[in-house]
Amino acid sequence: YGFINYSSALTADHVLFNSRYHQKSFIEESEKLLKHFPDNNELNSIKIIEDKSSVLPLGLDLLAFDAHKTSYDGSPLILWNHRWEYDKNPESFFKTLFKLNNNGVDFKLVVLGENFKTTPSIFDEAQRKLKDQILHFGYCENFSDYTQWLWKADIIPVTNIQDFFGISIMEAIYCNTYPLLPNRLTYPELLPVEMHDDHIYKNENDLYDKLCLVITRIDSARKTNMRSIAEQYDWSKMATVYDELFASFI
């Protein structure tokens, strides 16, 4: 697959990536791939791909979330709204919550997202250990239910180890859910640098500390409005960006 992706990019007139991280990682991995060939490895082609590539973020239908806005004023509500897969690193997410629970920290939990045949076992463990905290655990069958949980949620601690943009994170931020993001992948570029101290964590201990701090200051967190960060990706703004960019290719 790596060589197919590389050759497709080399053949294309222009190459678009979801984020700067997506672009950088593709360029670096393509170079590593070519270096495996002993001769005629065409390393100069990497610069060709880089020069004809640019970043085009995904467009999202965020305005649709407004029709389902609701409120919640119970215990601090923590959100998981990703697929139930290993690359979303649920082990780190739930172990942090187990630690909160063991230390007597008051919180509630909603776990959304699709699950598949090879669901990590940590989800079953979490359902047992956090049964008193769980308000919902499983896939939402309709958009309205999913959206209302995002509006109710207070905090989204993200532990993913693979992501090129972060659709589910932007959906949550649009609904005023307070993000705690790891200092890796595309996440640092999703937020302005001045927000990194509060919202970007260095390691699991830092995630726990930041999560505890947000929970103790939940009234302040609920007043934090980061909607404008996500709004820029709504199709009402992105459609023109796409149209103008594609028109420039013709």
Image (spheres, rainbow, N blue to C red):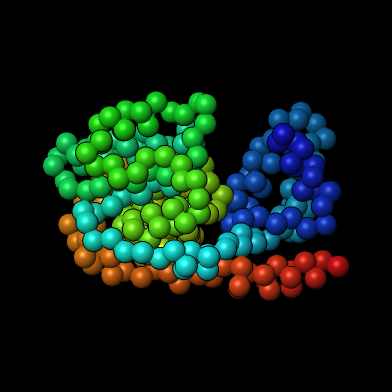
* Total numbered labels placed on residues in the image: 0
Question: Along the line of sight, which residue is nearer the eye, 126 or 17?
Answer: 126
Which quadrant is the N terminus positioned in? top right
Query: In the figure, residue 94 lies in which quadrant?
Result: top left
Give the image location of residue 204, x and y in percent. 31, 42
Q: In this view of the protein, can residue 169 be seen by the observer?
A: no
Q: Measured along the vertical axis of the image, is residue 44 above or below residue 199?
A: above
Q: Residue at x 44, y 64 (%)?
A: 68
The answer to whether residue 117 of the structure is visible from this angle is yes
User: At 40% across and 36% down in the image, what residue appears?
Assistant: 90
Q: Quadrant of the C terminus?
A: bottom right
In the image: residue 106, left or right of residue 242: left
Q: Nearer the viewer, residue 62 or 197?
A: 62
Q: Is residue 131 left or right of residue 45?
A: left
Give coordinates of residue 5: x percent, y percent: 74, 41
Residue at (50, 54) in percent of width and height: 143
Q: Residue furthest right?
A: 250
Give x and y (percent) for residue 151.
Answer: 38, 60
